[in-house]
Every structure is written in C-alpha cells, then in structure tokens.
Amino acid sequence: MVARFVRVDVEAAGEGDLELSLALAMGLQPGPSSDPEAVIIGYAQQRPHVLLFDGCESHIDEAAGVADRLLVSCPQMRIVATSREPLGLAGETTVRVGSLDTDEARRLFCERAGFDATGLDETSAEQVATVCTALDGVPLAIELAAARLSSMPLPRLVELLDDQVDLLRRSRTFDPRHGSLATALEWSYQLLDEQQQRAFRMLAVFRSGFEIGAGSVVIDDRYGADIIDRLVEVSLIQPPDARGLYRMLEPIRQYARFVLDQSGEEDEARDRHARWIAERCNEIFEAEWTPQIFEGHAWVVVNRFELAAALQWSIQAAKPDIGISILASVGRRLANQGHGALVLPFALDIINHQAATPSRELAVAMAHTTHILHLALDHDAARALINRAETLATELDDPIALGTVLARKAAHLAEAKGGPRQEHLDMILHGMSLLEQAAGSAPIEYHNTSVMAANLGDIGLAEKYAHKLLAWEKAHHGPTTADADARLGAVSLLRGDLDQAIEHIRKAASGHKALLVQDRGHWVSLACLLTYADRYEEAVEALDTAVELGDLFGQDLTDLAAPRMRVAFAASDMNAVMTHAREWFAWALRTEGPLRQIVPDLSALLRGGPVAESEFLAVLLPLAQALMAGGDTEPACRFARAASALMAQTAFGAWDEIGETERWEQLADQCPQREHDEPIQMSLEEAFHEAARLVGVETRPSSP
C-alpha cells in the first residue's frame, strides 16, 4: 500500500494546537469532545503515513512529544521534521543540510538570475563564482543575491558582498521565516536564550573558525563549550571539521557581526580575541624547536586571518604591545609560510606606534618584520628597520635580542647583495654565539649558519653546523631529526651524492609525517630528487603526499611543476607536460601583492642557489623533451645546444652529478646534425621568455 504524505506547519498551528492542525491536514474532523491524537492514531493505523512536521523549532517540545507518541502507536508511520535543532527522540536520524558545492551553487545562482551558465564570459563566470563563494553556498543567500540583479549589475553585487545582511534583504516575503536572510537569521537568533545570544554575537569576531577553547575564552563563560554545542544544534555554527575548527557560514557571521555591533560589545569581544591569539602565539614560541612546534606551524597557517585581525585590533585599540607580542612570537613563521603580505601593513604600524614599549619583544618583532620586507623585495626599508632593531637591542644590552637581530641582518644583507660574503658569515656566527651564551643553544641559527656556509661554498662548515643541529635534535626530539636531515641532504647534494641526498630528504619528510607535521616542502624536494634519479614511481608517491598536504591548507602547488612534468614525460603524456609548463610560466609572471612578485630579473627562479637548482632549468628540460617528442625540433634543439651556457649561469653546482648534463646531451643527439653546429650562447632571461612564448604565455620584457 502506498504511504500517504501529509504536511503540517508547526509554527502556523500555534502552541497547543499541533495535533488538531495535523488532524485537519489529514482530512479528519475531530468532534468538540474528541481527542485529536486518538483520532489520528485510529486513522493512521489503517494505512502507512509519512508526515512532514515543518518548522519544529518554533514549538520544539510540543512537536517532539506529538511525534514520539504517534511513532510509538503507529509502527507504519514515518515522520520527517524540518528544524534548526534535532527533536531528540530515540532512533532519530539527523540529516544536516549543508552548503551547495561550487557547481551546484553556480547553477542555482544562474537559474534564479535568468542566466545561461554556459554562455557567461570569463569575467562574468568569475564574478558569479565570487558571489557563491562569499555566500558559502547557502541556497537562500544565493537565491536572494540573484534576485538583487533586477536592480543592480553583477559587478556592483560583487562590491557589496562585505555587507551581506543589508544586501540580502528584499521587500516581498513568501514565508515569515525565510522572506530575507536577515529575517531568517533573526528568527533563529530570537529562539536563543540571553546567554546563547551573547555567545553567538561574541563568536562573530572569528573570521576563519575557532577551536572550542578559543571560543570559550572569547565567550568568557564557564559553560562556553556547552553553549557552542547548543549553537551547533540550532545550525548557527557548523560542526567541527577534521581539524577541530568550528565556524559560522559567512552570511551567518555577517549577521552575528551586525548584532554584535548593535550590542556595544564589539570592543570587549575583539580584545579577548586578540589577547587569546597573543597568548597562543607565545605558547608556540615557547615550543620553538621542539616536536610541538610542528603543531604550532600548522596552527599559524590555519589561523592566519585571526592573526591579522588581532594585529589590526592592537592598532585600532592603541595597544601595540599585543601586536608586538604576536609578531615577536610568530612573525618569522608567517614570513616563511608566505603570509607576510597579509600582516605587513599592520606590522609596520605596530612597531612604529608611539605607545610601543622598548623591549626585547619589540627588537625581535622588528627583525621578523625585516624578514617580511626582505621577501617583499623592499630592501631599503628592510635595511633601515634592521639597523633600528640593532640600535634598540644594543641599548637594551640584551644578548638574545641582539643575537636574533644580528642573525637576521646577516641573512638579509647576504641575500640583498646578490650572495653571501665572509662578513655576513662572521655576523651570523657572532649572533649565534650571543644566543648560545644567553640561552645555551641556538638551533635556528645552526640551521641558518649551515645554509649560509653552503651558499658560500664552504661545504665543511655547512656540514659542521648541520651535525650540531642533528645533535641538538637528537637530544630534544629523540629519533626524529627532520630539520637536520634536510640540511644534511643539501650538503650531500653539494657533494654530488644524489642517492645520499634522497635518503636524507626522505628521512626528513618521513620524520615530519611521524610528527603529524602538515608541511609539504620536504615532499616536494624529495619528488624533485627522485625524478633526477629516474625513480618515477617513488616520485609519484612523494608528489601525491605533497598535493594532499597542499590541498589541506589551500597552498599554491606550482612548485610541483618540474617533477610533475618529468613524471608526465616518462609516462609519454605530452599534454600534461605542456599544461604544467603553462601553469608554471603563468605563475612566474603573476603579481598578486608584494610577496608574490618575482625579482625583476627573475633571478630567484632562473639562477637558484648552491643548494637549490634553478627552477626554470628544472622545468625547461622536460619542456624541451616534450617539444622534441611532438616534432617541434627547432626550439628543442636550440635549448639543447644552449644548455651548457644556461647551466653555467646558475648558482647550482651539482648539475653533472644529478645527471642533467647527460640528459641535455641525449636530447642534443636527437637533433638533426648539421655541419658546424656549435653551442649557442643564450642568457637565462632569453631562454625564459622564449620558452614562455612557446607554451602560450605572454611575458614582459627582460630587465636590463
């Protein structure tokens, strides 16, 4: 027998009248003296029924009670309840309605806006995607945004996304709960008690999500964890993800920000948030160079937008010491993980603030901000700031501050002046000595000194400090010595021992994995080295791990281009080779903010360094091989005949040892032999621009 479907609107039924409304919806007419529930049960026992209780949150206890009694009395009955929180019945199955995925969201937007999704040009398609992403795929928000296109163009809609609550209002309503996003959220908000409402408002200060402990601190309530769970139950906060982070969908957070502003509690919430961030950053600093630091590294990546918000607040509230504490603790980590551009404007305002207290933390914050400026290629500003930091550290007579500043100054001067000199090595050795005397050890400077010595070609000194780091890690980490192994791998590569380099880098990558470190750098290096050794199956495994870790944190994967191209060529997939080549050249020429700009003469990519090969030549070889395989012999042969000249212009000293010279010679052997063929003199810049044009990427002229 086919089940009969019946819907009842719980809110419209009114409190105490749900059973009568349900009976009427079923077509029954209980008499004045009849019990509506008994009438329903008697009728429903005769045939299967599926009941829809719509909007149970308005009278949750009554809806739960009626549903429970009906299900016990009518085994053939099934009840579907829509609600912003579960009914809490035995055997209840909760299906949380999530956001639409990217394609679904775009289709819904285009359908409601009257667009032909397949007919959008590139700009409009990107704008539609921006709208759907900003609205977190929330169907109601997407429908309301699409409806606004009747009164404004799409580009204007994109501009207004920062004020979503006002944007997603409309005059007409089809349901008192869903007439506009603001109305729907107001409905949910009013169902909360006063304590829950305050927590909901305060949590709006988190931009990218929060751990349960962080949320409880900002709420400032001993029952914070229970309140957060309640907000999850009523769908105002998303359940924790795999990293343990709770978050509000962006349209909901915009509404929470609105009510927070109306409450006058924003300053309190942001101050609690900033102080908690500073405290957490200090914990990460205290765990520097211990196994726990790897968890801290991941935390910085995940919470980078929270860090930026806390830094911004420390300026707005004229409390620069909060920001200084954050920068001194994790400023170097932000720079090294590529997030310096996010915090640089705030960092400069903080360290220059008139209320900043002269201290070790300020000198160290200056040193880390110097590093960010250096990576942003503002060498003049970096030099001026590190000199100020040195003066402050000297005046404070603080060996830890001065040692940190001198080590950073040495690294900056060595890189800014086109390569290290002995004076820079002497400076970093002096800084390391100060740190060792004051703190007993200086593991970060063991690492940096090994790098600088390698850059100077002093392989013995580079190895000495790599072993000092190894001894320190064994004493503090036990069997896991990932960073020391990475340095020893670089030394092995300089010695021309590719197999030994692979084993060291594999041990470094595996050591990080054992510590649950979400860092893909060693896996990228391992994949590159394995392709040089023609060990392609192992390279694919390393690449898969690197991609997995990159996807986890939304990191750019362009530095995987070279090993991907080599693996694709080995598999005879020339289309993949060309695709990865185009991606790499487009990335190399992209400018998306100060930390994404490539050095004007492209030297960072073209020349590499003594312990890092030229990324360009690593990409150029499989590209030339693919061109040859595809019959485009003339440019392939030009590159092959220019290879010796190109390699001579790089700073990498192990091309012969890793087999690159032999591979170029093998390519040259495939070229048509002509009399008087001689090596071609070609600059790295000329080769770069020619190769980019061959894959269809327009380049800017080479710098003089």
Image (cartoon, rainbow, N blue to C red):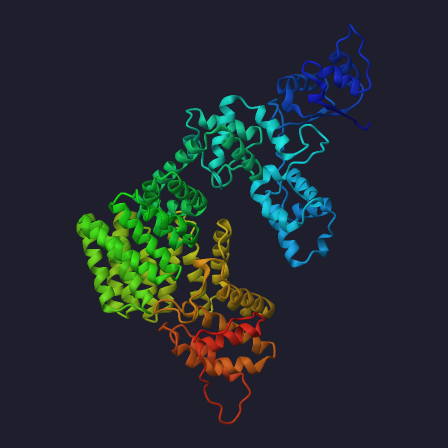
Left/right of residue 371 with respect to residue 671 in the rendered view: left
Give the x, y percent position of residue 33. 78, 5
Quick one: quadrant of the C terminus?
bottom left
Residue 446: in sight, yes or no? no
* Foreground pick, 306 / 672: 306
- Quarter holding the N terminus is top right
In the image, residue 307 sits, relative to residue 655, either above or below, namely above
In the image, farthest residue toward the front: 354
Residue at far bottom of view: 675
Q: Residue at x 68, y 17 (%)?
A: 66
Q: Position of residue 505 (x, y in %)?
A: 38, 60
Q: Picture coordinates of residue 83 (x, y %)?
A: 64, 27
Q: For this view, does 68 lie left or right of residue 454?
A: right
| Residue 497 drawn above or below residue 202 | below
Number of on-image labels: 0
Asked whether, in this view, residue 456 is left or right of residue 152, the answer is left
Residue 386 seen anywhere in this rendered image of the structure: yes
The residue lying toward the viewer, choosing from 497 and 239, is 239
- Which residue: 58% across, 31% down? 235
Query: Quadrant of the rendered structure where residue 335 is?
Result: bottom left
Q: Extreme top residue here?
A: 33
